[in-house]
Structure formats: structure tokens, C-alpha cells
């Protein structure tokens, strides 16, 4: 069972996760963080920026992104190269050479997945992977039906995911149809998974991922197969969890050394 931490707000969740990341960096300065995009991880990045301003050195940290759209320019405001550069690389003072995002350019797209897998394995993998969950239950851009053994590859987005992501674009027509995403098998290789979910709109998918059956119809349920998973949610996202009383009890009585 995942460790479920119910927090009062997204900001509190971001601070909790950021403090854990900082504690790991103090021990291992060349820590590798798996970074996600969208609005869910923004409180974590904001809290990390605060720690950076307070003197924490992130310059030796490496980062690997979960995914990238296919066919939009790198300089596009909503390309994940641009998002990670704004939210993580520049704001935390990372070496750009240590920050990796899948290649979504049309030229060479047939081998984009294999190249990213090689980069990940050559680096030695990810220490902590940040994850959000979509309303379809997707992790990264692994939509329902994705194999739990899948590796980084090109995927077709569901229309619901495109509609959900329209808020980042001027219209639905501008939202790409294809992406390069780490597979569920790739994600499960990370040494620690931290799944974040905030807001009532994520409650149904979150409950299915954490407490429902393990099934490819709910990609988020793949987290149940991992040995070290922490789920950080606010009250609204936790509203459909059946065992929330136990999660709160365990959280209140966890050992001092057991942060996440």
C-alpha cells in the first residue's frame, strides 16, 4: 500500500515534497529528479525555488522529464522543454546539460523513445519521480490501455486529455494529438514515486489508482506495483478514498524518520 499523505492545501503538499527532496540533495548532491508538467507539480517547484533562494544548492542535480508534445517548436511557450526550462532549470540554477526532455521534433520521431530510454538507463535512472494523474487516470501520457511494461514511446492522446490541456493553449485545435512519453514500465523503474493530486476533479481517478484494481484501464493503478510510493493529496482530492481514516492515523503516528 502506498503512503498517503493528506495535506491542507497544494502549497502544504509542495512544501512537504520539497523538504524531502532537499533532505536527499544534502546527502546526494547529484540527485536525479523526475519532473512532470501541468499545474499539479507547480507547488513543489515554487517551494523548491524558496529553498534555492534560502541557499540550497541544486546545481549538481539532474532532471528527466516525463513527456513532450510531438510537433511543436522547442521555443513554443507550452512545449515541455520551455515549461521545464522556466519552472525548473533556470529557477533552480540547474546546469541545462543535466536536464533532459524527450525529443518531440518530427524529424527522427520514430526513434525518439529508444533514444530517451538510452539516456535514462545510461544515466543510472531516476531517484524520485514526480507524478500527476489525469482525469482519464493517465500517468505521464500513458492513456487507458497502456501496458504496465511499456517503455518511452510515441502515444496518441485521448480527446479528453486534449480537452483538459486546452487551458494551456488558445484553442483545442492547437493542442497536439501526439506525444513522446515515458512508459509505465519506465516510470516504475524510478526508485521513489511521488504522486500528487489536488482538487475534487482528481478525486475519482485518484481513488481508483490507489484503492481500485490494478488494471491497464486505469494506468494510475500501476503505482500499486511499486515498492516505494508516496501519494500527496489535499482534502478535495482525498474525498473519495475509502480508507482515509487509516491514512490519517498512519500519518499522525508515523516514525519521525519516515518523511515520505
Image (cartoon, grey):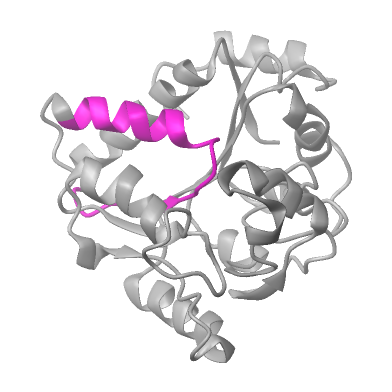
Q: Answer whether residue 32 is visible to the viewer in this image.
A: no
Vertical comparison of 62 with 46: above or below: below
Q: Answer whether residue 210 is visible to the viewer in this image.
A: yes
Q: Position of residue 136 (x, y in %)?
A: 80, 47
Q: Nearer the viewer, residue 189 or 209?
A: 209
Q: Nearer the viewer, residue 154 or 106?
A: 106
Find out whether residue 225 is within the magenta segment: no
Left or right of 192 in this view: 88: left
Q: Position of residue 37 (x, y in %)?
A: 50, 48
- State the image quarter where residue 189 is shown: bottom right
Numbered circles on residues, count: 0
Left or right of 137 in this view: 19: left
Vertical comparison of 252 with 220: above or below: above
Please tell me which residue is depicted at 80% across the width and 31% down the height of the picture: 207
Q: Position of residue 70 (x, y in %)?
A: 57, 73
Magenta-drawn segment: 29-52
Please tell me which residue is depicted at 33% across the width and 72% down the height of the picture: 123
Find out whether residue 37 is within the magenta segment: yes
- State the image quarter where residue 246 is shown: top right
Please tell me which residue is depicted at 66% across the width and 63% down the height of the picture: 184
Amino acid at each position: 500500500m502506498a503512503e498517503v499523505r493528506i495535506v491542507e492545501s497544494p502549497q502544504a503538499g509542495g512544501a512537504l515534497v520539497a523538504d524531502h527532496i532537499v533532505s536527499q540533495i544534502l546527502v546526494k548532491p547529484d540527485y536525479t529528479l523526475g519532473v512532470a508538467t501541468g499545474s499539479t507539480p507547480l507547488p513543489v517547484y515554487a517551494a523548491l525555488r524558496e529553498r534555492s533562494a534560502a541557499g540550497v544548492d541544486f546545481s549538481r542535480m539532474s532532471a528527466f522529464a516525463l513527456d513532450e508534445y510531438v510537433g511543436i517548436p522547442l521555443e513554443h511557450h507550452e512545449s515541455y522543454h520551455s515549461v521545464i526550462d522556466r519552472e525548473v532549470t533556470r529557477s533552480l540554477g540547474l546546469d541545462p546539460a543535466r536536464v533532459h526532455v524527450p525529443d518531440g521534433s518530427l524529424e527522427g520521431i520514430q526513434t525518439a523513445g529508444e533514444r530517451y530510454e538510452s539516456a535514462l538507463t545510461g544515466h543510472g535512472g531516476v531517484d524520485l519521480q514526480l507524478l500527476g494523474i489525469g482525469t482519464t487516470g493517465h500517468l505521464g501520457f500513458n492513456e487507458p490501455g497502456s501496458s504496465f511494461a511499456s517503455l518511452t514511446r510515441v502515444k496518441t492522446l485521448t480527446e479528453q486529455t486534449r480537452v483538459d490541456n486546452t487551458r494551456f493553449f488558445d484553442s483545442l485545435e492547437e493542442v497536439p494529438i501526439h506525444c513522446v512519453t515515458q512508459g509505465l514500465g519506465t516510470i516504475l523503474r524510478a526508485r521513489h514515486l511521488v504522486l500528487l493530486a489536488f482538487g475534487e476533479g482528481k478525486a475519482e481517478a485518484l481513488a481508483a489508482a490507489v484503492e481500485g484494481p490494478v488494471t491497464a484501464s486505469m494506468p494510475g493503478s500501476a503505482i500499486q506495483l511499486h515498492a516505494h510510493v508516496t501519494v500527496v493529496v489535499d482534502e478535495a482530492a482525498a474525498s473519495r478514498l475509502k480508507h482515509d481514516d487509516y491514512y490519517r492515523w498512519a500519518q499522525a503516528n508515523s516514525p519521525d524518520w519516515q518523511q515520505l
